[in-house]
Amino acid sequence: MATFDLLSGRDVEDFVRGTVFLGVGGGGRGEDGLAHLERAMEEGLRLRFTDLSEIPDEEWLCVVYGMGSIAPAEPSLEKPFGLDVKVVRRPMVEAVKALEDYAKVKIGAVAIFEPGGANSPKALEAGMRHGSFVPDGDFCGRAVPEMHQTLAAIRGIAPFPIAICDDWGHRLFLADAPTLHSAEAIGKYVSLVTKAPDPLATCAHAAYLMKVSRARDVMVGGTMSLALKIGRAVRAARDGRKDPVAALAETSGGKTLFRGKVSRVDWESSKGYMSGTTWIEASGGATYSVWFKNENHLVRRGKKPLCMSPDLIHVVDSLTGEPITNTKMAAGMDVSVLGTPNMLFRNSPGIDCLGPAYFGFDQPYIPFENVIEP
């Protein structure tokens, strides 16, 4: 059977580094995901991915993910909504069990919703603790801010029913919704309650219940093994005293767009999203901006667009190659910005739901490799 395991602390570190890179600024805090996998490894839990082609067709599959803003925040001392004691140890596992109870099926495969420093490791742990296969792949190929921006959604498959569980003991079921946008809003508003006492609390969703035979058509395959490969490439470059940014570009199939220093980060947290702009001054004097809504979506030099969603925009430390989430982005950082093509979303449905016009920019989608530099 085509599988790969995370066998050591080094493997876990490399894997999380790669998921943060593919998380394009969002996808949750890497340190959170790392801590979950390290604890699981200490407990002797096997951490294994299986190629989707090797999982039996008739197994029921779902995805599990956390929802909410990635904005920096501190735990509240006021205990809002009377939420004081966490009573659920593993909300993602509970969400999978709740979906089983609701649908009256046995789930045999738990898939990653999106690459990201928290969402991928925590979903892997949940799948392993549930005793399920965890496929080597995900539903998006990159982190995204909204649930309708999945390969499944653009191919016409709805995520319902959705089970929602959190640390405080909330347990909800969304049987259906008139639009994916309204379902997204409901999930985000639930996450505001979950995270009000503690921003690290998990608002876990289990969704997209389907047979594995159907999931083969709506998953982006190989992304978790790619994440491990990317993480290892950065480590090898540093150990060999080579440029880790060049190693990232080569391993991911992307391109380094520019390097510079972060001058400021303007952001706000609203309705479950962290949105704003990272401003970067390049050594040649040019000013670049990276606009984000949880994840990075548009890079410009002045007013000229260079790279945009659905393609992937990565911001990494220029010296170490460590990918940086928007939660931790700060003035003074020396960074490199890379672009990676997203071929499965370079079509009308993908561009409609994840391109610049969707985010309110009067800008047609242009593949970044077609942009002519001044």
Image: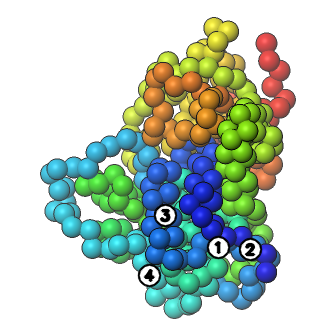
Q: CA distance from mark 3 to mark 1?
A: 14 Å
Amino acid marked by disc 1: Arg
* Horizontal side of residue 143 vs 57, given as left or right: left
Q: Residue furthest top?
A: 285
User: In the structure shown, which secondary structural element does the residue marked by tag 4 occupy?
Assistant: helix
Q: CA distance from mark 4 to mark 3?
A: 26 Å
Splitting the image into 4 quarters, where does residue 24 fall? top right
Amino acid marked by disc 3: Glu
Q: Which residue is mark 3?
A: 38
Position of 215 relative to 243 (above/below)? below
Q: Nearer the viewer, residue 63 or 262?
A: 262
- Of tags 4 and 2, which is closer to the observer? 2
Q: CA distance from mark 4 to mark 1?
A: 23 Å
Q: CA distance from mark 4 to mark 2?
A: 28 Å
Q: Which residue is mark 1?
A: 48
Q: Which residue is mark 4?
A: 98
**How many residues crowd mark 4 within 10 Å: few (<14), some (14–19), many (20+)?**
many
